[in-house]
Amino acid sequence: KNEVEQSPQNLTAQEGEFITINCSYSVGISALHWLQQHPGGGIVSLFMLSSGKKKHGRLIATINIQEKHSSLHITASHPRDSAVYICAVPNYGGSQGNLIFGKGTKLSVKP
Amino acid sequence: GAGVSQTPSNKVTEKGKYVELRCDPISGHTALYWYRQSLGQGPEFLIYFQGTGAADDSGLPNDRFFAVRPEGSVSTLKIQRTERGDSAVYLCASSRTAGDADTQYFGPGTRLTVL
Protein backbone atom coordinates (compact mmCIF):
# COMPACT_ATOMS: atom_id res chain seq x y z
CA LYS A 1 0.00 0.00 0.00
CA ASN A 2 1.30 3.41 -0.95
CA GLU A 3 1.87 6.17 1.55
CA VAL A 4 1.86 9.84 0.62
CA GLU A 5 3.46 12.69 2.51
CA GLN A 6 3.05 16.33 1.62
CA SER A 7 4.92 19.33 2.92
CA PRO A 8 4.40 21.90 4.14
CA GLN A 9 0.92 21.46 5.63
CA ASN A 10 0.34 25.20 5.61
CA LEU A 11 2.04 27.90 3.61
CA THR A 12 1.59 31.66 3.68
CA ALA A 13 3.22 33.74 0.97
CA GLN A 14 3.27 37.30 -0.27
CA GLU A 15 1.93 38.02 -3.70
CA GLY A 16 4.64 37.51 -6.30
CA GLU A 17 6.61 34.91 -4.35
CA PHE A 18 7.75 31.60 -5.82
CA ILE A 19 5.97 28.69 -4.14
CA THR A 20 7.09 25.08 -3.82
CA ILE A 21 4.96 22.24 -2.46
CA ASN A 22 6.46 18.79 -2.05
CA CYS A 23 5.03 15.30 -2.25
CA SER A 24 6.76 12.00 -1.57
CA TYR A 25 5.38 8.48 -1.82
CA SER A 26 6.55 5.02 -0.88
CA VAL A 27 5.60 2.67 -3.72
CA GLY A 28 6.61 3.07 -7.35
CA ILE A 29 3.80 4.45 -9.49
CA SER A 30 2.71 4.92 -13.06
CA ALA A 31 1.43 8.48 -12.64
CA LEU A 32 1.04 11.12 -9.96
CA HIS A 33 -1.79 13.66 -9.72
CA TRP A 34 -1.77 17.22 -8.47
CA LEU A 35 -5.16 18.61 -7.55
CA GLN A 36 -6.41 22.00 -6.41
CA GLN A 37 -9.28 22.44 -3.98
CA HIS A 38 -10.79 25.88 -3.47
CA PRO A 39 -12.50 27.01 -0.26
CA GLY A 40 -15.90 26.20 -1.78
CA GLY A 41 -14.77 22.57 -1.97
CA GLY A 42 -14.54 22.01 -5.72
CA ILE A 43 -11.58 19.91 -6.85
CA VAL A 44 -9.78 20.51 -10.12
CA SER A 45 -7.13 18.26 -11.58
CA LEU A 46 -4.02 20.31 -12.33
CA PHE A 47 -1.53 17.76 -13.57
CA MET A 48 -1.09 14.09 -14.14
CA LEU A 49 2.52 13.19 -14.74
CA SER A 50 4.63 10.09 -14.94
CA SER A 51 8.03 11.58 -15.69
CA GLY A 52 9.91 14.82 -16.08
CA LYS A 53 8.12 18.12 -15.95
CA LYS A 54 4.83 19.68 -17.02
CA LYS A 55 3.95 23.37 -17.20
CA HIS A 56 0.60 25.09 -17.36
CA GLY A 57 0.66 28.83 -17.10
CA ARG A 58 2.37 29.77 -13.82
CA LEU A 59 2.18 26.21 -12.52
CA ILE A 60 5.01 23.72 -12.96
CA ALA A 61 5.01 20.12 -11.77
CA THR A 62 8.08 17.91 -11.65
CA ILE A 63 8.54 14.30 -10.71
CA ASN A 64 11.58 12.18 -9.91
CA ILE A 65 10.49 8.56 -10.26
CA GLN A 66 13.70 7.14 -8.77
CA GLU A 67 13.43 9.28 -5.65
CA LYS A 68 9.61 8.89 -5.45
CA HIS A 69 9.19 12.62 -5.12
CA SER A 70 7.24 15.33 -6.88
CA SER A 71 7.08 19.09 -6.54
CA LEU A 72 4.48 21.64 -7.53
CA HIS A 73 5.80 25.14 -8.17
CA ILE A 74 3.82 28.34 -8.57
CA THR A 75 5.64 31.29 -10.08
CA ALA A 76 4.59 34.89 -9.41
CA SER A 77 1.96 33.77 -6.89
CA HIS A 78 -1.33 35.63 -6.70
CA PRO A 79 -4.08 35.74 -4.05
CA ARG A 80 -6.33 33.75 -6.39
CA ASP A 81 -3.86 30.85 -6.05
CA SER A 82 -5.00 30.50 -2.42
CA ALA A 83 -6.35 26.97 -2.14
CA VAL A 84 -5.48 23.53 -0.86
CA TYR A 85 -3.12 21.61 -3.13
CA ILE A 86 -3.29 17.83 -2.95
CA CYS A 87 -1.11 15.17 -4.50
CA ALA A 88 -2.45 11.69 -5.16
CA VAL A 89 -0.90 8.43 -6.33
CA PRO A 90 -2.22 4.98 -7.22
CA ASN A 91 -2.60 3.02 -4.02
CA TYR A 92 -0.83 -0.10 -5.22
CA GLY A 93 1.43 1.53 -7.76
CA GLY A 94 -0.83 0.58 -10.63
CA SER A 95 -3.41 2.55 -12.53
CA GLN A 96 -5.28 5.56 -11.25
CA GLY A 97 -8.37 3.57 -10.32
CA ASN A 98 -7.62 3.47 -6.62
CA LEU A 99 -5.88 6.67 -5.56
CA ILE A 100 -4.43 7.54 -2.20
CA PHE A 101 -4.30 11.24 -1.39
CA GLY A 102 -2.00 13.39 0.65
CA LYS A 103 -3.53 15.53 3.38
CA GLY A 104 -3.01 18.62 1.30
CA THR A 105 -1.07 21.87 1.57
CA LYS A 106 -3.13 24.89 2.44
CA LEU A 107 -1.71 27.88 0.58
CA SER A 108 -2.63 31.43 1.41
CA VAL A 109 -1.23 34.20 -0.77
CA LYS A 110 -1.48 37.68 0.74
CA PRO A 111 -1.74 40.78 -1.45
CA GLY B 1 -20.28 20.45 -22.07
CA ALA B 2 -21.73 19.47 -18.70
CA GLY B 3 -19.39 18.41 -15.97
CA VAL B 4 -19.89 15.81 -13.27
CA SER B 5 -22.99 16.52 -11.23
CA GLN B 6 -23.98 15.20 -7.83
CA THR B 7 -27.28 15.26 -6.03
CA PRO B 8 -28.25 16.27 -3.49
CA SER B 9 -25.68 18.94 -2.70
CA ASN B 10 -26.51 18.64 0.99
CA LYS B 11 -28.15 15.83 2.90
CA VAL B 12 -29.01 15.88 6.58
CA THR B 13 -30.26 12.66 8.06
CA GLU B 14 -30.71 11.00 11.40
CA LYS B 15 -28.57 8.20 12.76
CA GLY B 16 -29.84 4.86 11.57
CA LYS B 17 -31.49 6.12 8.38
CA TYR B 18 -30.74 5.03 4.82
CA VAL B 19 -29.37 7.50 2.27
CA GLU B 20 -28.67 7.47 -1.45
CA LEU B 21 -26.23 9.79 -3.13
CA ARG B 22 -26.28 10.19 -6.89
CA CYS B 23 -23.53 10.92 -9.38
CA ASP B 24 -23.97 11.83 -13.04
CA PRO B 25 -20.62 11.51 -14.80
CA ILE B 26 -19.51 13.26 -17.94
CA SER B 27 -21.18 11.63 -20.93
CA GLY B 28 -19.02 8.92 -22.45
CA HIS B 29 -16.76 8.49 -19.44
CA THR B 30 -16.43 4.81 -18.66
CA ALA B 31 -14.61 5.17 -15.33
CA LEU B 32 -16.38 6.55 -12.27
CA TYR B 33 -14.90 7.03 -8.81
CA TRP B 34 -16.35 7.65 -5.37
CA TYR B 35 -14.35 9.31 -2.60
CA ARG B 36 -15.20 10.82 0.74
CA GLN B 37 -13.50 13.72 2.46
CA SER B 38 -13.66 14.45 6.14
CA LEU B 39 -12.96 17.94 7.43
CA GLY B 40 -9.30 18.86 7.17
CA GLN B 41 -8.35 15.63 5.42
CA GLY B 42 -7.56 14.68 1.86
CA PRO B 43 -10.09 12.62 -0.09
CA GLU B 44 -10.27 8.91 0.67
CA PHE B 45 -10.96 6.34 -2.04
CA LEU B 46 -14.13 4.30 -1.70
CA ILE B 47 -14.86 2.48 -4.97
CA TYR B 48 -14.40 2.82 -8.69
CA PHE B 49 -16.32 1.49 -11.66
CA GLN B 50 -15.15 0.58 -15.10
CA GLY B 51 -18.40 0.47 -17.05
CA THR B 52 -21.10 -1.25 -15.02
CA GLY B 53 -18.80 -3.30 -12.81
CA ALA B 54 -17.00 -2.30 -9.66
CA ALA B 55 -13.33 -2.68 -10.57
CA ASP B 56 -12.13 -2.00 -7.04
CA ASP B 57 -14.34 -1.62 -3.96
CA SER B 58 -11.58 -2.06 -1.40
CA GLY B 59 -12.12 1.42 0.02
CA LEU B 60 -15.70 0.84 1.17
CA PRO B 61 -15.41 1.00 4.97
CA ASN B 62 -17.93 -1.74 5.77
CA ASP B 63 -20.97 -3.56 4.43
CA ARG B 64 -23.28 -0.63 5.19
CA PHE B 65 -21.84 1.03 2.09
CA PHE B 66 -22.80 -0.12 -1.38
CA ALA B 67 -22.61 1.46 -4.83
CA VAL B 68 -24.14 0.60 -8.17
CA ARG B 69 -23.83 1.74 -11.75
CA PRO B 70 -26.39 -0.43 -13.55
CA GLU B 71 -26.18 1.11 -17.01
CA GLY B 72 -22.59 2.27 -16.95
CA SER B 73 -23.51 5.90 -16.55
CA VAL B 74 -25.22 7.24 -13.41
CA SER B 75 -24.01 5.79 -10.14
CA THR B 76 -25.65 5.67 -6.72
CA LEU B 77 -23.81 5.34 -3.44
CA LYS B 78 -26.04 3.78 -0.81
CA ILE B 79 -25.42 3.95 2.92
CA GLN B 80 -27.52 1.88 5.29
CA ARG B 81 -28.00 2.49 9.01
CA THR B 82 -26.06 5.73 8.88
CA GLU B 83 -23.76 6.61 11.76
CA ARG B 84 -22.46 10.00 12.87
CA GLY B 85 -19.01 8.99 11.65
CA ASP B 86 -20.35 8.79 8.11
CA SER B 87 -20.65 12.58 8.05
CA ALA B 88 -18.35 13.84 5.31
CA VAL B 89 -18.35 15.26 1.80
CA TYR B 90 -18.85 12.47 -0.71
CA LEU B 91 -17.10 13.21 -3.98
CA CYS B 92 -17.61 11.62 -7.34
CA ALA B 93 -15.26 11.84 -10.30
CA SER B 94 -15.21 10.42 -13.79
CA SER B 95 -12.62 9.91 -16.48
CA ARG B 96 -12.70 8.74 -20.08
CA THR B 97 -11.06 5.49 -19.01
CA ALA B 98 -9.17 4.41 -15.91
CA GLY B 99 -5.95 4.66 -17.87
CA ASP B 100 -2.98 6.66 -16.64
CA ALA B 101 -3.36 9.35 -19.27
CA ASP B 102 -6.97 10.23 -18.45
CA THR B 103 -7.75 13.15 -16.19
CA GLN B 104 -10.33 12.70 -13.45
CA TYR B 105 -13.05 15.34 -13.39
CA PHE B 106 -14.60 15.91 -9.99
CA GLY B 107 -18.16 16.77 -9.09
CA PRO B 108 -19.03 19.39 -6.46
CA GLY B 109 -19.70 16.76 -3.82
CA THR B 110 -22.58 15.90 -1.51
CA ARG B 111 -22.21 17.07 2.07
CA LEU B 112 -23.74 14.39 4.29
CA THR B 113 -24.52 15.22 7.89
CA VAL B 114 -25.72 12.47 10.20
CA LEU B 115 -27.30 13.81 13.37
Image: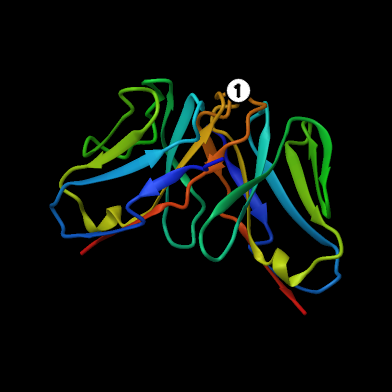
- Tell me the quadrant of the picture where the N terminus of chain B can be found: top right
Residue located farthest toward the left when viewing the structure as drawn:
B16
Image coordinates of residue B102 in percent, x first then y, are 63, 29
**In the shown orientation, is residue A48 left or right of residue A88?**
right
Residue nearest the viewer, comparing B40 with B24: B24
Chain ID, mark 1 = B
Residue located farthest toward the bottom when viewing the structure as drawn:
A111
Q: Residue at x 56, y 27 (%)?
A: B96
Image coordinates of residue B37 in percent, x first then y, are 44, 52
**In the shown orientation, is residue B70 left or right of residue A50?**
left
Crowding around mark 1 (Cα neighbors within 10 Å: few <14, some 14 to 19, many 20+) is some
Image coordinates of residue B89 in percent, x first then y, are 39, 54
Image coordinates of residue B10 in percent, x first then y, are 33, 59
Q: Residue at x 67, y 36 (%)?
A: A32
Image: A35 above or below A108: above
Q: Residue at x 39, y 35 (%)?
A: B59
Image: A51 above or below A57: above
Residue located beneath label 1 in the image = B99
Secondary structure at numbered mark 1? loop
Residue nearest the viewer, comparing A59 with A7: A59
The tally of labels here is 1
Image: A18 above or below A26: below
- Tell me the quadrant of the picture where the C terminus of chain B can be found: bottom left
Type of amino acid under label 1:
Gly
